[in-house]
Amino acid sequence: MLDFVIRSHKWCLTPIIGMCLILTAPAWSATPDKFDPAEYVHPECQPTYYEMNEKGDKCVAVEEKIKLLDSASCTAANFNFDKKQKLCVAQSKELEIKCRPIPGYAPKISGTGKDAKCNFERTTPVSAPGDYIGDCFHIKAIPPDTALAEDKYYLVSGQKNVDANNDDRELTLVSAENWWHWPPGCAAEIGGTQHQVLASQLIQAGASRRGYAYGFLTMPYKYFPGQKSFLINVPIGGYLGWRYGQAGSGTTLALAVTLGSVKANTVDPTKLDAAGKPTVTGTADVAAFSRAIGIIFDVLKSSKGKAFKAGVFVGRDIVNSDPTIDYRFNRKTWVAIQLGYDFTDSQ
């Protein structure tokens, strides 16, 4: 059913994956604010021979008009002709309910008569990921009702919402040349043609998309292969990457930086133990800066909602080089599972 919602984007703490961070942002579904399904109902009676009753919940026969029909006209109108009385007669019937058509949605009627309402379910993909300017599309199958060419590249030079619900975008595509320098996108052709195409049309045709992606992420569980140890902390940071692939199966190569708190030993560098190392005097929470490189996957198996995102990163933690702090994982390589929220996929 269509409604306006406040959608929460979150990562959740589980024994396997990671912590829970909730980012709450307004998100429009397929319906304008103050949506009343009754407004979309068209109660109708068969014209000429039926009219709505005073209650507005039933179609009643207009006897004055029907009884004037001859036998052939009566039968053609699906009425009964009484041969004895030589009259055409009709029975009252239920109100016929029709839903106002909405492109991309299938109507479902609930209730009867004047209480009938139309509910709608989406039948076409949403346009998420939804920010396209600067991205490049490779057309592999020509979307219906477009003048795009097969095996051709197009650069997105503009976009606008096609309705107040932000469910789809009208994109301005410019003919482009494949550009295999970094970044591996495409460059607009001199004198290239422009096309106005809906984002959902490109998604349904399986067009390949390339473009920048950026957002928040967290990597709470880290494994240090050299030390054969796990570390759990709560780093928060961001990433910048290059996304490519089809809708629902995109891959992003990304660089990430995070900042978190780790547990380290405090030491007295003036006192050495039997092994010749500074004496441990206690523990302290210290800030750790992390740098990482990795790959993020998004998978979308439904036309509704946002893609699931997860990834794998390899990086290192760096803490302050204070001689009184001893962090045993300082500058050691780790591998981590990542969960994130992509700003470029916002709707």
Image (cartoon, helix red, strand yellow):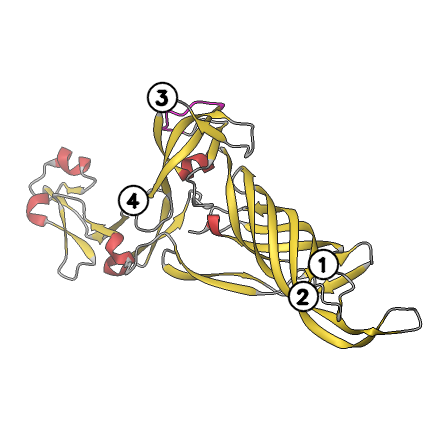
Q: What residue does disc 4 label?
A: 101
Q: Earlier in the sequence, mark 4 or mark 2?
A: 4
Between discs 2 and 3, the one toward the N terminus = 3
Q: x, y (%) of residue 281?
A: 79, 78
Choose between 286 and 155: the one closer to the eye: 286
Query: Horizontal placement of 18 versus 174: left or right?
Result: right
State which tag comes first along the sequence, 4 or 3: 4
Residue at 7% over, 44% down:
65
SS class, disc 2: loop
Residue for badge 2: 233
Q: Which residue is mark 1?
A: 222
Question: What residue did someone put label 3 on?
Answer: 191
**Element class at badge 4:** loop
Q: Amino acid at mark 1?
A: Lys
Distance between the alpha carbons at the discs numbered 4 and 3: 39 Å
Tell how many labels: 4
Question: Which element type, helix, strand or loop, lies under badge 1?
Answer: strand
Q: CB of mark 2 within 8 Å of CB of mark 3? A: no
Magenta span dominant secondary structure: loop
- Magenta residues span 144-151
- Residue 57 visible in image: yes
Badge 4 amino acid:
Pro
